[in-house]
Image (cartoon, rainbow, N blue to C red):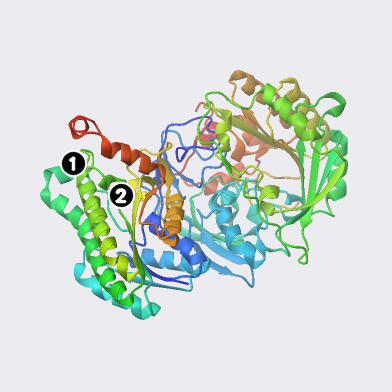
Amino acid sequence: MTKPYVSWGRYPYKEQRGMDLQWRTDVLPQEPNVLPQGNARSYGDSCMNQGGLVASTRFLRRFMQFDPATGLLQCESGVQLADIINLVEPQGWFLAATPGTKFATVGGCIANDVHGKNHHLEGTFGRHVTRFELVRTDGTRMICSPTENTGYFNATIGGLGLTGLIVWAELQLKRVPNSAINLETIKYKDLATFFELSAESEHTHEYTAAWIDCLASQEKLGRGHFLRGNHAKVTQPRVAAGKLKLSMPIDPPLSLVNSLSLRAFNTLYYNRQMQERSYATVHYDPFFYPLDFVQDWNRMYGPKGFLQYQCVVPNETSYDATREMLQRIAAANSGSFLVVLKVFGDVPSPGLLSFPRPGATLALDFPYQGNKTLHLFDQLDDVVVQAGGAIYPAKDAHMKADHFKLFYPNLETFTQYKDPGISSSFWRRVMEANA
Amino acid sequence: MKNWIIVGATSAIAESVCRLWATRGYKLFLVARNEGKLQQIAQDLKVRGAAQVDTFSMDANAFELHGQCFETAQKSMGKVDGIFIAHGTLPDQKACETSFNVARAEIETNALSVISLCTIAANHFEQQRQGDIAVISSVAGDRGRQSNYVYGAAKGMVSVFLQGLRNRLAKSGVHVLTIKPGFVDTPMTASIDKGGPLWASADQVAAGIVKSVDKKCNVVYLPWFWWIIMNIIRHIPEFIFKKMKL
């Protein structure tokens, strides 16, 4: 077992104390500096609280109500997406929006207003939250919904846990004819083709995203596999889940992701599909959660941990900005096995600090290599700022304070709803200039 | 479908086991001290598919209520197929050393209350000529160590009692399972610094328990590697062992 309460990226590795909330009636501990935490699947320090206490909801994992007729589900905030899928998928329901791991908690999905491959149609996770209960450090409890305590509702969605503890939430699920996905994989040759494919698939495919070979350069820059899919038809046979489960039981002394392994993997992976297009009906697990089958895969990056970089750049500048970033990443000979590029839609989220906005979003991991990594991030930041984009706090461990204020113009409204007894390493980093 | 009584149902391991049984559509009769907590769990288990969930609030040390508890379970479920005993406390060893009253209270909770419940269940199942008794003991009961020998003694008593009970009930078709978990990441172990290869989650241990009940195992170490660890620990000669810091 890896140490509880430490963020997924394991960088920066903070000293903090943790405690577990176990019951809906529990109150937040009476301490000056507390941060609610889910299953700690955020990559950076938004779920960390150096020098303070994290109050974990990992044992707050009970269902409260599920109506198979309407798809309305009420559960405690520590319930993981996997728990929900196991319960509702056999009854013909699925999550309306899901991130790339099913081990995230409902509370965490709300606090980070996560998104998935269907953002262009369904928007963020927060759009499908009908209400939740919020407990503040002063003991106040309130039900928040789009019509009740709306200010708190909007601030809590994407609010990084800073407005209080989400005790339980109610979600509207989506009815699906078949949880399997009819998937088309298109091997494409350059970045321009990616944007063409995205535009063409926007209205025909529920799920779209691309895997990118982050080391390809020049005319091959941005090449990859474009994945697009729709739920299979009700008449199609159900697809069995894969049996293979791997785990990373130990910490390798060095990162297994390095320039050698990366180049070999990316070249092989790009060329594993011979023909330009392939079609398959796949189980939802490898489609939505490709990394979840390797338990503790974050250990692959060794004891120094890793950082993820996820940004969004608006449509007007997305081609040039993405191109610029990919060039810099390829030149640095860095990056990861799983690099994802996707075009967000314009479905608005209620969240004041919600990250997704119209444009292209690029996400990839970097093993932490000290200044080399941080220097590359500074370069990428410049591109994002110039393009008028934003960086995703859930993945972040480096964003600069002035950039955060630039990326999130609703910040001032948000601070009115922030719980004064709650803070996080992330919050202090971006709000207190000298922290 | 089976009907189970779960004593100590608000413990993390028991709750996790109940979730697995609920998805199978079992009837569950939950016993613990706090009715409010039991209700939260019952609601969850119903959503997960339990055919019926009833609750009974009782302190395990209220020995006089044990009989009534069993009878109520039988009335509400129609028949009892198994009892899973999962309650327990992790004593403060230092407090047990300075006060015998503390030590006695811990032994009552962790051993005597278990023996009382097992006695009632055993007699009932013996007549019924069918039934499962599954009890959480501990690897700590395999050898006394200075760091928690009062807890170890209580769990050791439970393990030996169950050995005898298994021997007695074998001919009646009643099955007795002794569960010996190692370090489990639950609220009971909140005060200990966690992380590392020896720590298991409550879900992992629960999956092992459900499997062991299905397979009619007798004694099970969870996770399995504790069988190796405890075999080594049990075989260290006493003259060496007494000087070790365990």
What residue sits right under mark 2 in the picture? B138
Pair 2/1: label in front? 2
Residue at 32% from the left image edge and 42% from the top image edge:
B191
Q: Is residue B39 above or below residue A247?
A: below
For disc 2, the chain is B
What is the quadrant of residue B41 in the picture?
bottom left
* Relative horizontal placement of residue B213, taking residue A371 as reference (left or right): left
- Say above or below: A279 vs A178: above
Label 2 element class:
loop
Q: Position of residue A17 (x, y in %)?
A: 39, 38
Which residue is farthest front?
B171
- Position of A420 compared to A219: left or right? left
Amino acid tagged 2: Ser
Mark 2–mark 1 distance (CA, rounded to whole Å): 19 Å
Along the polypeptide, which appears first: circle 2 or circle 1? 1
Residue at left offset 51%, top offset 48%: A163
Q: Are marks 2 and 1 in contact (CB under 8 Å)?
A: no
Q: Residue at x 51, y 34 (%)?
A: A428
**At which x and y percent is residue A222?**
81, 32
Percent across and percent down for residue A22 are: 40, 54
Q: Is residue A270 above or below residue A139?
A: above
| Residue A279 visible in the snapshot | yes
Q: Circle 1 is placed at which residue position?
A: B94
Horizontal and vertical percent position of residue A422: 46, 43
